[in-house]
Amino acid sequence: MATRHLLVTGGAGFIGANYVLYWLANNPEDKVVVLDALTYAGNRESLASVENNPNFTFAHGDICDTALVESLLKEHDVDTLVHFAAESHVDRSITGPDAFIETNIIGTYSLLKAAKKVWIDEPKANGKAPLKHRFHHVSTDEVYGELGPNDPAFTEETAYAPNSPYSASKAASDHLVRAYHHTYGLEVTTSNCSNNYGPYHFPEKLIPLIITNILHDKPLPVYGNGQQIRDWLYVEDHARGIELVLNKGRLGENYNIGGHNEWANIDIVKLVCKLLNEQFQKKPELAAQYPEAKTALDNKAEQLITFVEDRAGHDWRYAIDATKTNNELGYKPVESFETGIRKNIEWYLANEGWWKPLIEVNKKVK
Ligand code: NAD
């Protein structure tokens, strides 16, 4: 594969950072520029291990700043834009949708505008062919709406029916990306992925929230009756899927990425409780490191579970059918949930220095 010059938006966020680490480890000749506004969800610490890599550059800025995006595309000879930057927390989209409209819709439009100008319009004005390029848009399964218990999982043919301001803003951005391909010939691909878990996940999201609350002996809030179902994928398997779409995906297509791994929220919470209880029983040194975690130390973390009022408009079930991605691109997740969730818990136990300051950040932005 020829070397690439990537612009990764939102590369200091959860999935973006994991993607950058994965990409530089597996494509060491490539150059990666991260553009990130460092909102509450962005954290340069997640990129600490590549900060000194000569093929890595960090640019602090907003995707809505079209002139900045244009100059980065030119200055770094970018041929591949991978777009993760977004407001991503559904609860925040319910209490304050403005930022979601601004970043997820206007921000995506700004990137498309800059990409079209630099890669297609300017060469054309000089009598040249478009520059070699790819615009990859990272999206979510939430754009498809919700499933009932017996519905088949979402395929790429499922009609969009977003229910939250978050998923509606992502759906709008997916449509803009599609339109830029159809109307202007911009070379785009889009991937729609299920719920991710893994390292560097901000502690407002379910799995890291449960882990860090257990470590502080705080209640574990579970919406409604906890029976909502989500389909979980290890974050590196998402990065691997995007790599395949970039290398082998057809232009203008959407690819679903998922691992056939549906769990009710309450069962995930109980599993995390059980695994953390086990860690505390197996490793006595954890008691000194996490003296507040009294209930888990007593092997009873489940007692912290607290049912809270359900989220407004809460989607009941999401599930991804990734047959197209499996068959066409040879995609297959590598990490089993059994090993991935253990690895994830061990990562949080070993990386208190990364997540502890974020508990305060989370309180401030709430
Ligand atoms: P995240 O909230 O952890 O990170 C988002 C990043 O974008 C942060 O670093 C933030 O600083 C940056 N950002 C926000 N607004 C910006 C702006 N205006 N300009 C530049 N940077 C900005 O999100 P995530 O969970 O890593 O999700 C990344 C992408 O993947 C999103 O597009 C999301 O919709 C999609 N996705 C997420 C999941 C999931 O389970 N988390 C699943 C499927 C798809």
Image: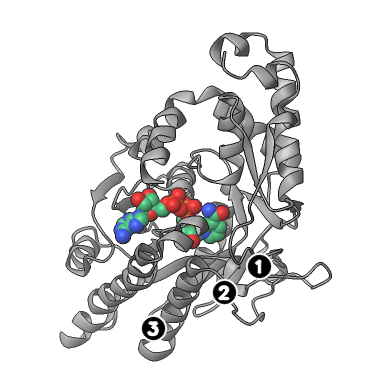
Which residue in the structure is indicated by mark 3? 180
The amino acid type of the residue labelled 1 equals Thr
Q: Residues within 10 Å of mark 1 (few under 14, many from 20)?
A: many
Placement of 138 over or under 187, stated as above or below:
above
At 70% from the left and 35% from the top, the residue drawn is 272
Placement of 347 over or under 42, stated as above or below:
above
The amino acid type of the residue labelled 3 equals Tyr
Q: Residues within 10 Å of mark 3 (few under 14, many from 20)?
A: some
Ligand 1 neighbours mark 3 (CB distance < 8 Å): no
Q: Residues within 10 Å of mark 2 (few under 14, many from 20)?
A: many
Ligand 1 neighbours mark 2 (CB distance < 8 Å): no
Asked if labels 1 and 3 touch by Cβ distance under 8 angstroms, the answer is: no
In this view, the residue farthest toward the right is: 150
Placement of 74 over or under 183, stated as above or below:
above
Q: Nearer the viewer, residue 158 or 59?
A: 158
Which residue in the structure is indicated by mark 2? 162
Q: Nearer the viewer, residue 198 or 136?
A: 198
Mark before the other along the chain sequence, 3 or 2:
2
